[in-house]
Amino acid sequence: MRTDPSPALPWAPRRTLAPAIMLLSLLSACASIPEGRPPGTTQPPSSSGGQSPTVPPPPPRQPPPPPTAGFRTPQVLNLPGLEQVIGRNTADLTRLFGNPRLDVREEDMRKLQFSGDACVLDVFLYPMRPNAEPTATYVEARRASDGQDVDRVACANALRRR
């Protein structure tokens, strides 16, 4: 019977065996495990050249529905204090605020931008019925200096011609 503590593996000392086993167990956790396949599918063909069934193609996708044709009535901002702006046409707004700094048209929508030292006011105009003249339906306001939102009514009042 041997009394000397000899290593279990002659090529590896005992003190390095434990860290090696821990390292191998950590690395084995990194190995990927193939996910289960949905019912009705098969394994991909093997690289050994053997024939195996192929995966059926996915069902065809439904095309997106066509855009809704026709006119959509816009939502109108109902905010007390903006009665002098909401519902007005371009000519009325120009009389109220002066010439717009920007006048952007996109299909039947129009955006007028009025600016001053205090703020910038964006007024969005949409027709209320098909082929009608666009009128103001929505307003946004921000500081001219840093673009932070400001009170819309206060901005409209600050930009009004006196």
Image (cartoon, rainbow, N blue to C red):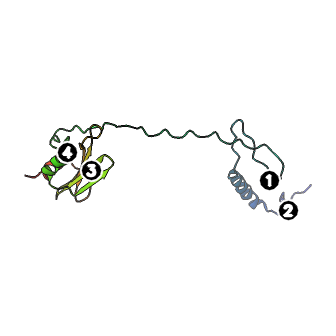
Q: Residue furthest bottom?
A: 11
Q: Please state which amino acid type lies under the numbered disc 3.
A: Lys
Q: Residue at x 14, y 42 (%)?
A: 84
> Looking at the picture, which amino acid does disc 1 mark?
Ser
Report the side of 106 relative to 3 (left or right).
Answer: left
Residue at 79% from the left image edge and 62% from the top image edge: 13
Structural crowding at the residue carrying mark 3, measured as other residues with C-alpha within 10 Å and reported as few (<14), some (14–19) or many (≥20): many
In this view, the mark in front (4 or 1) = 4
Q: Position of residue 142 (x, y in %)?
A: 24, 52
Residue that sits furthest to the right in the current view? 1
Residue 128 x, y percent position in the rendering: 26, 38
Q: Is residue 31 left or right of residue 11?
A: left
Asked whether the beta carbons under mark 4 and mark 3 sit within 8 Å of each other, the answer is no
| Residue at horizontal 20 percent and vertical 46 percent from the top | 152
Q: Which mark is residue 89?
A: 4
Distance, label 4 to label 3, CA atoms, is: 11 Å
Q: Nearer the viewer, mark 3 or mark 1?
A: 3
The disc, 4 or 3, on the residue closer to the chain's N-terminal end is 4
Q: Which comes sooner in the sequence, label 2 or label 4?
A: 2
- Identify residue for label 3: 111
The first of marks 3 and 1 along the sequence is 1
Give how far apart the Cα atoms at labels 3 and 1 are.
Answer: 62 Å
Circle on res. 10: 2
Q: Residues within 10 Å of mark 1 (few under 14, many from 20)?
A: few
The secondary element bearing badge 4 is classed as loop
Q: CA distance from mark 4 to mark 1?
A: 71 Å
Residue 47, label in figure: 1
Q: Earlier in the sequence, mark 2 or mark 3?
A: 2
